[in-house]
Image (tube, grey):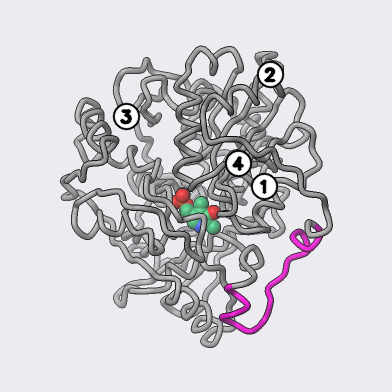
Amino acid sequence: MQYISTRGLTQPHTFSQAVEAGLAPDGGLFLPDSWPDISGKLGDWEKLGYAELAAEFFTLFAPDIPREEWHSLTQRAYERFDSPDVAPLRKLDEKTYVLELFHGPTLAFKDFALQLLGLLYKRQVEHTGKRLAVLGATSGDTGSAAIHGCMGQEGISIFILYPNGRVAPLQERQMACTGASNVYAIPVPGTFDDAQRVVKQTFGDTAFAATQHLSAVNSINIARVLAQCVYYIWAWLRLPPEARGGVEFVVPTGNFGNVLAGWMAQRMGLPAGSFRVATNQNDILYRFFTSGEYRQGDVHPSYAPSMDIQAASNFERYLYFLLGEDATKVREVMEQMRSGDAVNIPSGQTAMKASRMTDAEIRETIGRIYASYGYVMDPHTACGFTGMASDRVSVVLATAHPAKFPDVVQSATGAEPTHPTLEALKSKPLETHPLEATPEAVKAFIDAQHRA
Ligand SMILES: *Cc1c(COP(=O)(O)O)cnc(C)c1O
């Protein structure tokens, strides 16, 4: 199994090389060059624990790492989760399940990929002897999950940019209160898309990226998408057999990484029925899936800040398939998008539904679900609870713990949600490294802090 770029101008990479590179050198995103069929394995996989399932899954996609080593990696990645199921599936009623993806160290689903990625980086440093500078942009949760995957690890420095004042205060504390000397939390002016642009520009200086051994840690890393495939398989296996075939996965969506992982699992043979992309008021993906037009607007901060995105970085992987796996067309469309034009894309093969939710609806929904089921959820998860399919079972992915967003949850339910991990952070000193939103400022800072 090798990894190719959506833009077609990169030599095939092994799994480990693709993980190390993050972004493909031609600016595209890595995808596997073939798709193993998992449908015949599901029976055996039903008996496995979460970490075992993840190891078996990765053995198919990363044969360059031995199976026993995968088992040890996934064991270590998922033993820090606070539920024995790692991703517990909760039943609200006959038609509605919630897949809780917030039992990891930073209480959001990004821990699934980034605990593992941190260990893969560590393995790489051990194998190559080269110190890594991990760089990423975050709307809140990726950054804290990445930091918790890398903090305190020998040979790794981690630099995370985030939009100043636009991540939730507790998310900022998770990044800036670790006390770890290899962690740099960097607020920059602007929105998440600005922070992400600076990161992309920094990687665009390939000489700098090579000398610093720069690795990208945002949702574009292929290891991350693959790690997220696992919980769709896990959830499907935990459903009663009669609910499985037609099941609709409802996925709160920003960068399109999470829902892409589900779609990829389906493409490998997981018999899931359908997917719904659930956005907040930043609804570019909702508009795309309902009209076929992909047009970027301005970002409007919402109650669900990890979805305040208008440039969904993983969308290019899906686009590659919509355009018939034609890398030349992908390059043309990406160029058109960059120039700010609206782009019409054939969405014919699209099996995805879409919904959107305003802030007022988010608050109302948290209150309504609490009143109906006594279940408290966070504002991202709430975006999934609209337009439920009437003819099939829905599994809504719960992407964060409600205690990460206490204000809106309290105003909707009357009670302040808490979590011991977050309570402990409130008394720790905040250490941030504010920079201008330019690649020059970021490169100078990395130069000063990191010895490759
Ligand atoms: C990142 C995030 C999302 C969006 O996931 P994408 O993979 O970017 O679509 C949704 N909810 C929460 C809590 C998140 O942290």
Helix, strand or loop at label 2? It is: loop
Q: Is mark 2 within 8 Å of ligand 1?
A: no
Q: Nearer the viewer, mark 1 or mark 3?
A: 3
Most foreground residue, 95 or 333? 333
Q: Is residue 415 magenta?
A: yes
Give the percent coordinates (x, y) of residue 99.
52, 63
Most foreground residue, 354 or 411? 411
Q: Between disc 2 and disc 3, whose residue precedes?
A: 3
> Mark 1 and mark 4: span between their CA atoms?
11 Å
> Mark 1 and mark 3: span between their CA atoms?
30 Å
> Mark 4 and mark 2: span between their CA atoms?
18 Å
> Mark 2 and mark 3: span between their CA atoms?
28 Å
Q: Is residue 233 visible?
A: no
> With 29 as the anchor, is 435 left or right in this view?
right
Instruction: Look at label 4 and name its amino acid.
Output: Leu
Numbered mark located on residue 131 in the image: 2
Instruction: Look at label 2 and name its amino acid.
Output: Arg
Helix, strand or loop at label 4? It is: helix
Give the percent coordinates (x, y) of residue 333.
22, 35
Residue that appears at 34% across and 59% down: 283
